[in-house]
DNA sequence: TTTCAACACGAAAACGTTTTCGGTGCTCAT
DNA sequence: ATGAGCACCGAAAACGTTTTCGTGTTGAAA
């Protein structure tokens, strides 16, 4: 077992100083051609690679991005990480991933953990609990310490920083509008509780679309799900009671569950009831019938967030206080769960 | 913007030495009650947290685990990461995630990147290309440098290290056997090309089940998919030509595609043809009909891998050379795509 | 009064780098 | 012979810790 070789060891072997070795490897003009080649040959032979931890300490830069997301077993977040990882990699950065499990405490702990030197900046999406408590002191603190933060998707206006989002409101509006255009009358909404920021925005978009078209908003057509893991019953009940001719769901899980409920009630999709989902993931694509969704490009979102963070990290110091919010465009992917809209 | 405070700064403020501050904060008995309280109060006030990079350098331990997987936008791998992250967190470790994108070169680059001090050990699953090339020198090298590696799912016997796998062969055997027990006669197999280790093992399990029951293996019933993104045609063609009464697919994507193909050909699932998939993911659960699958508990797999790695990291040095291979049990999750088996 | 332990603290090394600032020793022009 | 200038290299600081080893000051025992 040959352990990693250090500058000191090379210096000792070659009977020169550490400085000489370091300079030789970095092709400094201070070093003679002879010694440089000698050192470089030796280093190559022993497969010398500088210790990144030592470099991090010296440079006060880790070339690492910290990610904090609610969960990873979730197609959208996985795509975002993928997007982040790829552009991070292109720029020589690594990513360290932590999960909040939708818990405020875990979000805080993870943040403090990473803030102590391990990373150069954060990319994060708020946990449900954090959004509910509206307590963002941990984020304000790291920003105040000079560490850049980029928030995506689940953001808050209480914190000033770079953000990348989709226009949830407009996207929902467009989706519902297209249903209205196709003469659907009883358009149900399956959404989350209001403290989930994106859920609220999509709900607002739904309402706005109805109002814009002089439709009245029927609360019995709106179902707010608290516990996403046990939504079948509630959805089935709603479908049965109000018999909508179209359903707009704020995520694909609600959408596919609505379809299953419809089937159970003997209704065919899209013949008897049309369904539009949100977030273009695996389920929508492979469900039968496949589901028309508002696509939400996680790869692009993650890539954009990473780019913004790296730009800020590498800009010549503190030209800031002009935070930007990037909006990723969405579009409707029409599939089998609706007529061709 | 108040920057992070260091021991040196505290020492200066309080007019004591750095050592005194460090010892005070670690409750060393060498320090008087007075100074200790003074220092601790000051540290708390300024929210002192030790710099983890400095600690890493000193201790030669980063408390970080490196993960290398083929891709993250893949339910199984996401669950594994989730499993790893949770037990890592419980033990005070962070995880840094890199993606090989199924490329040998990226796998090597990422590995070398992380091997230079950033992490204490690896958890990885081989890329397709690596499995194809059978070139594992990069892995042998880091192990040789004393860095522990745990491989999961896509492993190789060419490398000696801890491994976590499922018994792909037995799981496939059992699945096919249960089809045979229910009097299915034309059982088709949709699998990957043979150099993907798990695909090969599952294929072997299928063949073994047939042979054990004195059925002959009909090559026309076996479809080997090269390009997973364009498998619809091939699957549809096979379904049409051989008209199987049951299909065993080595992943859930093939399974759901088979169902779609069947529907397209006017065959009902499970009435006309039964389908069993592999990997219990989102698709199987929410597809209509939902798909009977061989469950592969990624969370447990990741957790086990993390535990093995941490155990090795924290065992009192080098009692090793007795590498273990853990087998995660599987079971058949019966859903709507088969009769109750 | 001397001696010695106990106590409280500081100096310095170490982890592995990079970089600044000085040195040498040489050549060459004066 | 003297000095300037150059080519080459090393010492040391710095990043932020922890830890070993000293060292000075007490107080009490001899």
Image: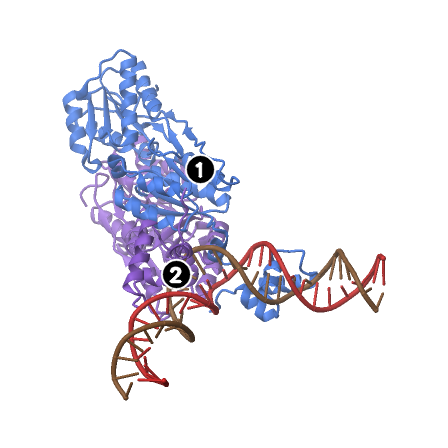
Chain colours: A purple, B blue, C brown, D red
Residue B35, relative to residue A10: is it above or below?
Answer: below
Query: Label 2 to label 1, Cα distance in Å?
Result: 48 Å
Q: Nearer the viewer, mark 2 or mark 1?
A: 2
The residue depicted at 30 percent of the width and 28 percent of the height is B277
Which of the pair A87/A206 is nearer the observer?
Answer: A87
The answer to whether one can see residue B75 in this image is: yes
Q: Nearer the viewer, residue A324 or A166?
A: A324
Callout count: 2
Where residue B157 sits: x, y (%)?
34, 30
At mark 1, the secondary structure is helix
Q: Are marks 2 and 1 in contact (CB under 8 Å)?
A: no
Q: Chain of mark 1?
A: B
Residue at x 58% of width, y 64% of height: B18
A210, B210: nearer the viewer: B210
**Image location of residue B237, percent across then percent down:** 14, 27
Q: Does B209 appear above or below B13?
A: above
Which residue is depicted at the point 34% across and 40% down? B139
In the rendered image, is residue A119 in sight? no
Mark 1 sits on what residue?
Answer: B303
B315 above or below A215? above
Please provide percent x and percent y for residue A145. Answer: 46, 65
Which of the pair A155/B189 is nearer the observer? B189
Q: Residues within 10 Å of mark 2 (few under 14, many from 20)?
A: some
The quarter of the image holding the N terminus of chain A is: top left
Where does the image place residue B205, in percent across and percent down from the top left?
30, 22
Q: Are marks 2 and 1 on the same chain?
A: no
Question: Which label belongs to residue B5?
Answer: none
Q: Quadrant of residue B41?
A: bottom right
Report which residue position mark 2 lands on: A16
Residue drawn at (24%, 21%) of the image:
B273
Say which element carries label 2: loop
């Amino acid at each position: 077992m040959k352990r990693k070789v250090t500058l000191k060891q090379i210096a000792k072997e070659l009977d020169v100083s550490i400085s000489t070795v370091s300079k030789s490897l970095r092709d400094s003009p201070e070093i003679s051609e002879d010694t440089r080649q000698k050192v470089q040959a030796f280093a190559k032979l022993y497969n010398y690679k500088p210790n990144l931890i030592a470099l991090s300490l010296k440079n006060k830069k880790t070339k690492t991005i910290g990610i904090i997301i609610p969960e990873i077993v979730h197609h959208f977040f996985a795509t975002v990480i993928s997007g982040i990882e790829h552009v991070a990699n292109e720029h020589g950065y690594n990513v360290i991933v932590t999960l909040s499990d939708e818990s405020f405490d875990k979000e805080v702990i993870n943040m403090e953990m990473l803030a102590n030197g391990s990373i150069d900046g954060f990319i994060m999406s708020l946990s449900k609990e954090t959004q509910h408590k509206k307590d963002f002191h941990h984020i304000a603190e790291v920003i105040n310490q000079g560490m850049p933060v980029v928030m995506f998707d689940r953001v808050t206006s209480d914190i000033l920083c770079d953000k990348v989002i989709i226009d949830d409101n407009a996207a929902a509006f467009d989706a519902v509008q297209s249903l209205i255009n196709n003469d659907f009358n009883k358009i149900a909404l399956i959404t989350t509780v209001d403290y989930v920021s994106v859920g609220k925005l999509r709900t607002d978009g739904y309402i706005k679309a109805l109002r814009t078209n002089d439709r009245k908003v029927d609360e019995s057509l709106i179902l707010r799900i608290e516990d996403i893991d046990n939504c079948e019953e509630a959805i089935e009940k709603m479908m049965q009671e109000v018999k909508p001719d179209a359903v707009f769901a704020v995520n694909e899980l609600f959408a596919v569950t609505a379809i299953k409920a419809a089937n159970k009630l003997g209704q065919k999709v899209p013949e008897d009831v049309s369904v539009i989902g949100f977030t273009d993931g695996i389920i929508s694509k492979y469900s039968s019938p496949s589901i028309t969704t508002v696509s939400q490009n996680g790869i692009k979102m993650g890539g954009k967030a990473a780019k913004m963070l790296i730009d800020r990290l590498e800009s010549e110091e503190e030209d800031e206080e002009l935070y930007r919010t990037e909006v990723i465009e969405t579009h409707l992917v029409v599939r089998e769960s609706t007529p061709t809209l």
